[in-house]
């Protein structure tokens, strides 16, 4: 199949070829791709819709940009022979116009290392239009980053651009500077914005045997409580833990996300198709979500919502299990970590109560004992304080009693193995 050189049809064609089947390549040099290679997600940030100002947490993101460059730094889980970038306009109501786009190896301070900057093209063109509600996959870029390489990705937004699709927080700061700075090594006088803007994935051309595991979650998966800018989210530690096993890790965590509710991102059932099942190379998914479904009702996050029930959460998990199994994906259920005292003394007090703790225990008992997930990652037992099982172990607690810190995230990652994730006969690493 050959794609037209320049048009929206070219972009749609590229997306189909890149994501529809393992090893597909939408570039004009398809024949040069060895049969033993495929495209797989090696970095991911789930798109989410910007919310209104009436919510208790501000986005910290401007309503629009124009004539500005956005630079983001990402750390890959696995390297590859070439890469492609994916931009998302999933929640936009108007087309997203991308100007010049470049990718470079990133230095420790996020600067683009001299001599590594390469132009990114879309259907052979230097710019692109992303239709409302759609993603856009770039042409392959002849950059061959190694495992855990850090990339600086810069995109110029020439015209008025509404920021309706973004990724909030993630312990990462995007830089925004005036004018076309895509080729500049550093972003002088840039404004920092918490999170990601439009960039949603990096695909790597990897050996056919490579498998991607997607982690579907909330702020615990998004890394809240970890050291900002250090790539110490638990999926980051998981990638390092599995190094050498031909496993890529895609982080589909959204701070504030819920299994059944919306507001800070769509509910997990609504985004499962795009954030998990649609990932090229995906072979397994770890589900760690539900604590916000329990904690939000009656708190400042959702003061008028009724209390969640175990039956509703179990029904939601069963839907994810059914969807994963229909695609022959292995699905691992993670127990909900302890959260006694969560956010106490903050404007968000009310997240925890004894009744919510009883509900968490009921849900965890089902995850552990029902036998409906293919495997169970028991993060509750791993993280809880032996002297007070409803609370997080102090050495693992970030301090807010809800999110682990760096040590807790590392312990979570290192408790998983290939047998749990993929059913492999061995347990290494």
Image (tube, grey):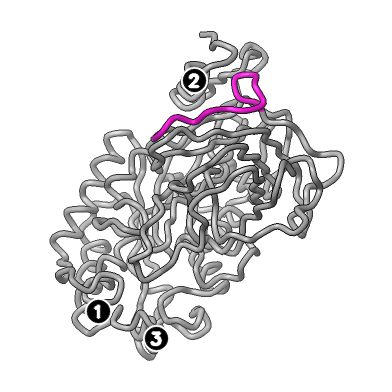
Pick the quarter of the image with the C terminus.
Answer: bottom right
In magenta segment, residue 130: yes
Label 3 sits on residue: 386
Characterize the local packing of mark 3: few (<14), some (14-19) or many (20 or more) Cα atoms within 10 angstroms.
few
Question: Which numbered disc, 3 or 2, marks the residue that appears first in the sequence?
Answer: 2
Eye-nearest disc, 3 or 1: 1
Q: How far apart are marks 3 and 1 (CA)?
A: 16 Å
The magenta stretch is 121-132
Asked whether the viewer can see residue 413, the reply is: no
| Residue at image location 41% in from the left, 33% down from the top | 132
Name the residue at the top extreme: 1
| Residue at image location 27% in from the left, 40% down from the top | 323
Give residue 225's position: percent from left, percent from top: 52, 73
Label 2 sits on residue: 8
Image quadrant assignment for residue 273: top left
- In front: 128, or 234? 128
321 to 95, vertically: above or below: below
Asked whether the viewer can see residue 150, the reply is: yes
Secondary element under disc 3, as helix, strand or loop, is loop
Characterize the local packing of mark 1: few (<14), some (14-19) or many (20 or more) Cα atoms within 10 angstroms.
some
Label 1 sits on residue: 357
Question: Which numbered disc, 3 or 1, marks the residue that appears first in the sequence?
Answer: 1
Question: Which numbered disc, 2 or 1, marks the residue that appears first in the sequence?
Answer: 2
Characterize the local packing of mark 2: few (<14), some (14-19) or many (20 or more) Cα atoms within 10 angstroms.
some
- In front: 426, or 365? 365
């Amino acid at each position: 199949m050959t794609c037209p050189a320049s048009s929206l049809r070219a972009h749609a064609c590229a997306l189909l070829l890149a994501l529809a089947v393992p090893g597909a390549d939408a570039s004009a040099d398809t024949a040069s791709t060895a049969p033993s290679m495929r495209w797989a997600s090696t970095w991911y940030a789930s798109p989410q819709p910007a919310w209104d100002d009436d919510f208790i947490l501000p986005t910290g993101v401007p309503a629009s940009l124009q004539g500005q460059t956005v630079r983001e730094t990402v750390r890959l889980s696995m390297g590859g022979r070439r890469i492609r970038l994916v931009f998302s306009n999933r929640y936009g109501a108007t087309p997203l116009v991308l100007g010049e786009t470049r990718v470079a190896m990133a230095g420790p301070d996020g600067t683009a290392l001299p001599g590594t900057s390469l132009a990114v093209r879309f259907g052979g063109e230097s710019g692109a239009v992303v239709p409302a509600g759609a993603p856009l996959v770039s042409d392959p870029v002849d950059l061959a980053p190694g495992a855990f390489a850090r990339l600086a990705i810069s995109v110029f937004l020439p015209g008025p651009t509404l920021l309706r699709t973004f990724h909030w927080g993630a312990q990462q700061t995007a830089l925004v500077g005036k004018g076309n700075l895509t080729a500049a090594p550093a972003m002088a006088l840039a404004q920092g914005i918490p999170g990601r803007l439009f960039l949603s994935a990096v695909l790597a051309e990897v050996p056919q045997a490579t498998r991607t595991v997607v982690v579907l979650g909330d702020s615990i998966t998004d890394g809240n409580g970890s050291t900002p800018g250090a790539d110490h989210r638990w999926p980051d530690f998981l990638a390092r833990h599995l190094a050498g096993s031909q496993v890529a890790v895609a982080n589909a965590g959204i701070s504030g996300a819920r299994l059944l509710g919306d507001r800070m991102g769509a509910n997990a059932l609504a985004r499962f198709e795009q954030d998990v099942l649609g990932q090229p190379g995906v072979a397994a998914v770890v589900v760690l979500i539900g604590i916000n479904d329990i904690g939000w009702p009656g708190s400042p996050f959702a003061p008028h919502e009724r209390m969640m029930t175990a039956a509703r959460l179990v029904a939601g998990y069963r839907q994810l299990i059914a969807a994963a199994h229909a695609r022959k994906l292995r699905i691992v259920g993670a127990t909900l970590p302890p959260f006694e005292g969560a956010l106490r003394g903050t404007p968000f007090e009310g997240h925890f109560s004894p009744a919510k703790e009883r509900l968490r225990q009921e849900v965890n008992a089902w995850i552990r004992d029902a036998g409906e997930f293919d495997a169970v990652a028991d993060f509750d037992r791993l993280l809880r304080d032996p002297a007070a099982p409803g609370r997080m172990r102090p050495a693992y607690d970030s301090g807010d009693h809800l999110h682990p810190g760096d040590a807790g995230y590392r312990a979570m990652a290192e408790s998983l193995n290939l047998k749990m994730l993929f059913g492999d006969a061995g347990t290494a690493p």
